[in-house]
Amino acid sequence: MSDFVRQESYPCAFTSNESWVILSPIEQSIKRKIEAVGVPLKDWDISINYGIKTGFNDAFIVSGAKRDEILANCKTDDERKRSAELIRPILRGRDIKRYSYEYADLYLIATFPSKHYDIDDYPAVKDYLLSFGMERLEQTGKKYKGFSARKKTNNKWFETQDSISYWDEFNKPKIVWGNLNLSATYTLAPAGMMINAPATMIVPASENLLCILNSKLADYYIRNLGVTRNGGYFEYKPMFIEQLPVPKNIDENLFSEFTGKELQNEKEIDRKVYELYKLTNEEIEFIEQK
């Protein structure tokens, strides 16, 4: 046993109070290069936020047909216009794919508490929500026979569970991804598109950052920050994503020849990322085998 330990051991310097992991020499080299070249995303001028928690998706997320029905019940053109602006398209984590998404024709009744809406300005929306029963919609955490009210908050019955003070970020293009995936699965979502928690978003969006996040190298680094679940699934939490060091001042056209509406060449994107972080052929082969 002692011979095995001597043969398989690696020198490690524990010189700080920070958390540490035991890495092989090649893993240490890759880690050093990534961190030397890039700046952690948490230190960028960007925002990383979860999507929307309604506390009751069955009521607040509606189909396109139900949206049309609610709008048809509006009494005036002005109410119909206000209500149409309130009911916004939304993506769920399962809709988000690698470099694309599949829109399921779903809409969110976006009554964010931070917007201070008066529900009486939206009679058709109010009637629709009340069809679920006030007890089910209230945010008191009370338990009833067969169900519980939404968790206790200071929000009103018709409002989403979370305040969403960053609501304006949804009005901008963004990078989005689902929470639980087998590998990196990021895409761009347009301005005005909502996303449902636990899916997450980065604003502002950047094609360069999108390609780096989807690369094998970035995924290798991020997945080493957490624990992979059974079946190979990993929880892509913001606390991991924000630690990824990414080079600043990259040529904005670095990946443009390889991407477009449809992904053209992922191998070329990976090659560009490896060059960006100055990896050797041996280090690249190690990542590829991973």
Image (tube, helix red, strand yellow):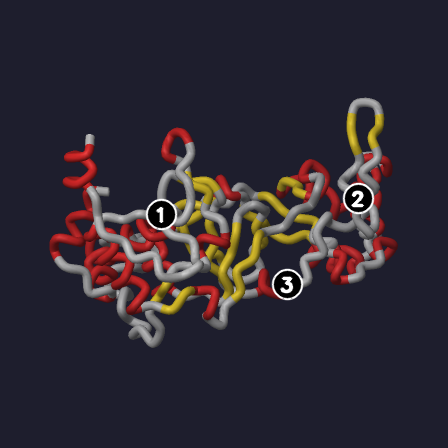
Q: What residue is shown at x 37% (from left), y 46% (from top)?
A: 223
Q: Earlier in the sequence, mark 3 or mark 1?
A: 3
* Left or right, 220 with reference to 74: left
Q: How far apart are marks 2 and 3 (CA)?
A: 21 Å
Specify the quadrant of the image occupied by residue 138.
top right
Left-right relation of 86 to 121: left
Please rate how many residues cluster around mark 3, counting C-alpha atoms within 10 Å: few if below 14, some from 14 to 19, many from 20.
Answer: few
- Where does label 2 land, which residue? 152
Residue lying furthest front in this view? 2
What residue would you read off at disc 3?
Answer: 166
Residue 120, percent from left and from top: 87, 54
* Amino acid type, residue under disc 2 in the picture: Lys
The disc, 2 or 3, on the residue closer to the chain's N-terminal end is 2
Which of the two marks, 3 or 1, is nearer to us in this view?
1
> According to the image, label 1 marks what residue?
224
Quarter of the image with the N terminus is top left
Q: What residue type is labelled 3?
A: Tyr
* CA–CA distance in space, label 2 to label 1: 36 Å
